[in-house]
Image (tube, grey):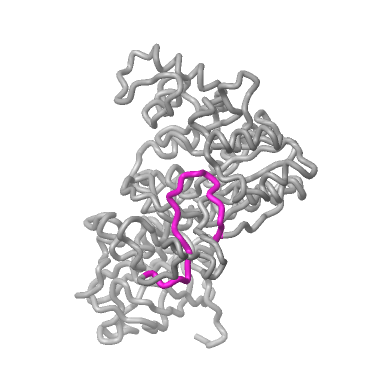
Amino acid sequence: MTDSLIRTPIRQLLATAPTGQAVRVRGWVRSRRGNKYVQFVALNDGSGFHNLQIVADLNRFSEESLRDVGTGACISVDGILVASQGKGQAVEVQAEHIEVLGATDADEYPIQKRGADQKGISLEALREIAHLRPRTNTFGAVLRVRHALAYAIHHYFHERGFYYLHTPVITGADAEGAGQMFRVTTLDAAAPPRTPEGAVDFGQDFFARPTNLTVSGQLEAECGALALGQVYTFGPTFRAENSNTTRHLAEFWMIEPEVAFNGLPENMALAEDFLRYLVRFALDTCPDDLAFLTEQYDKELLTRLRFVVDNDFQRLTYTEAVEILKAAKQKFEFPVEWGTDLQSEHERYLVERHFRKPVILTDYPKEIKAFYMKINDDGRTVRAMDVLFPGIGEIIGGSQREENEARLRQRMREMHVDEHELWWYLELRKFGTAPHAGFGLGFERLVLFVTGMTNIRDVIPFPRYPRSAEF
């Protein structure tokens, strides 16, 4: 072998016809087996789901030279790519030189062969070693699907003339009015400066005012849409909600398109086309990873993904949905009445039992929606929309925004939103206002749906939730 060899990704080699060429591969050992004549090493470099078999003839290698080639070790292999003699793979590498780049103490390595295949080690236990869990088949698959979806999001919007807008992570505005935000400050937490009245003097803080980590980039995205026409955000958002459910994170990523001149019908059409594109992209580009996740975790996963791709989304109003739910023979844990927010059990009934297709609900009561949503002519409902998926319920929430300054001010007063704090948002309605609409898609919720995982903490590399920020 020669030092001029360049490393080839394993995924590329597995798609290569065995022509006898010299190759160099590097990766992490998933398993090692064999006998006194030959050793077989399963090697994975993360480029794809499948391992590459390395064959080490013990006439060439001594047992001592292979001592550190164990599960978890990182090795470099030079050899000849040949047709495989075994089942399950077309090619393998006949090793001529093996170098251990990073040895692993087998007694201390927490992910042994069974763990690498995600058997015998729980997902909960893997969260405690988040720095190592990407080496398992499960999290390698999840992270590759996550990457594919992120790429598809940017590709989708770029091809359709959207501009990627970077909205601030630090903000003085609470877009949702929820109040559950992480404070950003440089003041001494033990002894902050005080005003004469005894309140914390934020005038001495870095930004000279209270600031927080953002819960949404929507309000700033509206600024971009009312200048560039159509924009989207894709960035981290934060909620200081003390929740330990399988659907909540303290730090997560949001995709928020905003489009000038769109109304609610155009907003629904964009959301449907966008979601179907993303699911189809995952099916087309991650077949091996999705096949593994289907086999190991959710036998109905591929069927559910094709359910989204193959069916037009059903559109109906919140009022119509309430009537359907009240007439349903199924008993719900939470009673349904007009004016109450629908629960996941209600949303899933509409999707999975009644319509048997994805659903877009519109025209919600104004009391249960945000201040910026445009009120309908009935004065009771707003031009809101929620997209509901099987198995997960709401996956997208959006609306047509209120573009009229006077009506927006009135709505802010009704909902006790500080007009002074959002003066700039109101000025959008004062200078060249226009109809516009948009929606938000929680990225982790999308990845949760596409991978079939059951806990949102398992679809982000380093999850943030109450009492967990170690990694």
Of helix, strand and loop, which mostly describes the magenta segment?
A: loop
Can you give x and y, in whole percent of width and height, for residue 157 in the image? 67, 48
* Residue 264 among magenta residues: no
Number of numbered tags placed on the structure image: 0
Q: Give, as a single range, the part of the protein colored magenta.
A: 169-189
Q: Residue furthest left?
A: 107
Q: Residue at x 29, y 54 (%)?
A: 123
Can you give x and y, in whole percent of width and height, for residue 423 in the image? 66, 49
Q: Residue at x 51, y 27 (%)?
A: 359
**Which quadrant: the C terminus?**
bottom left
Can you give x and y, in whole percent of width and height, for residue 158 in the image? 70, 51
* Residue 170 among magenta residues: yes
With respect to residue 459, does 414 lie above or below? Answer: above
- Left or right of residue 164: residue 55: left
Q: Residue furthest right?
A: 432
User: Can I make out residue 90 in this image?
Assistant: no
With respect to residue 48, does 158 lie above or below? Answer: above
Q: Residue at x 30, y 86 (%)?
A: 65
User: Can I make out residue 412 in this image?
Assistant: yes
Q: Residue at x 45, y 65 (%)?
A: 46
Question: Quadrant of the rendered structure where residue 432 is?
Answer: top right
With respect to residue 16, does 59 lie above or below? Answer: below
Can you give x and y, in whole percent of width and height, for residue 317 in the image? 55, 21
> Toward the viewer: 207 or 67?
207
> Toward the viewer: 411 or 99?
411
